[in-house]
Amino acid sequence: MSGRNSVHILVTKTLCGTVWLTMLAMALSACSMTPTAAEQELANMAKEHANDAPVPSPMAWTEPAQPVSGKAVKYTSVDGQQLNGWLAKPDNAAGDLPAIIVIHQWWGLDDSIRRAGERIAGQGYMTLAVDLYNGSVAGQPKDAMRMSRALSNNEEAGLANIKDAIAYLKSVGATKIGVIGWCMGGRWSLLTALNFHDDIDAAIIYYGGVTDDKEELVVLDMPVLGIFAGDDFIVPPKKAYAFATSMAELKKDLEFYIYRDAEHAFSNPSGTEYNPEAAADAWEKTTAFLERNL
């Protein structure tokens, strides 16, 4: 990527040997994240994940590139009760580090998300896996749906949680702050960048709900990496392209990939739709993006 004010649009096969530079015109339909659109996305999630389960995937359970230690830390409170996140950093870290907020998918802050944070930390970062479910973790799709709907209906509380995560990372010496999330967490990664754009230095969205509303997107002055699936009922390519089109028209710094043969959640830390080829390539793009921008 050449720098700011550039948008890279790539549509790839699952194994990224072939690159398409077409189909951008599909993005012309409106797809703003209105409350109705957000509720429809939740309904689509329930349908898509009806038979899913939070089984660990290699995305999280691949060993970090270097030894990493993680621990529970109290970074925020809800109704007077302290809430734990999972802080990880390399064992040999000397001095302050760039930090990354890690936002869980709809299952919640489980061991797979903790391990995902540790794997990212192995690239040389401090990571904080946050808990937007206030200590609850889902084991069944119906529970995940209930928790994700409650969060969607109380967005202010979720944003307050993220605000405290940013403040915590600054208090422990973060030199820069990025954010990453998958699926529902991808939507919250974008919300974090939109609402705390003065604090966020890079944002990564893995097939999360996005908007094409340029009045909202205009504040995104940080580099953004968008990774999407071509076979996606929840965030269909048409919607992802519309987001990319608006970012291009605003001359924002977006690096954007669609894996046309991959399904939604193909690189989740847990779940049954893991696609090893697409996930491996997306990981390479993620780590390269972070190295350039954090």
Image (cartoon, grey):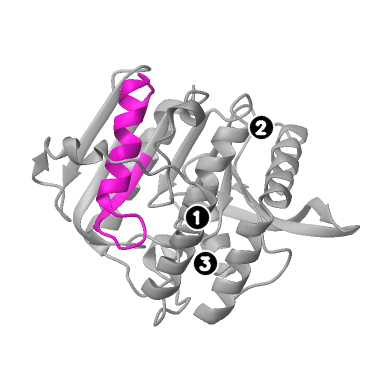
**Residue that label 1 marks:** 36
Instruction: Give, as a three-letter code, the residue at label 1.
Output: Thr
| Mark 2 element type | loop
Residue 253, percent across and down? 38, 24
**Most distant residue in the right direction:** 80
Residue 170, percent across and down? 72, 32
**Residue that label 2 marks:** 174
Q: In the rendered structure, which segment of residues is drawn in magenta?
A: 226-254
What is the quadrant of residue 149 in the picture? Answer: bottom right
Q: Earlier in the sequence, mark 1 or mark 2?
A: 1
Q: Earlier in the sequence, mark 1 or mark 3?
A: 1
Residue 99 lies, with reference to residue 64, above or below; the image says: above
Which residue is more in the foreground, 171 or 224?
224
Residue 68 lies, with reference to residue 215, above or below; the image says: below
**Residue that label 3 marks:** 112
- Is 235 covered by the magenta stretch? yes
Instruction: Give, as a three-letter code, the residue at label 2.
Output: Ala
Q: Residues within 10 Å of mark 2 (few under 14, many from 20)?
A: many
For marks 1 and 2, give the CA distance: 37 Å
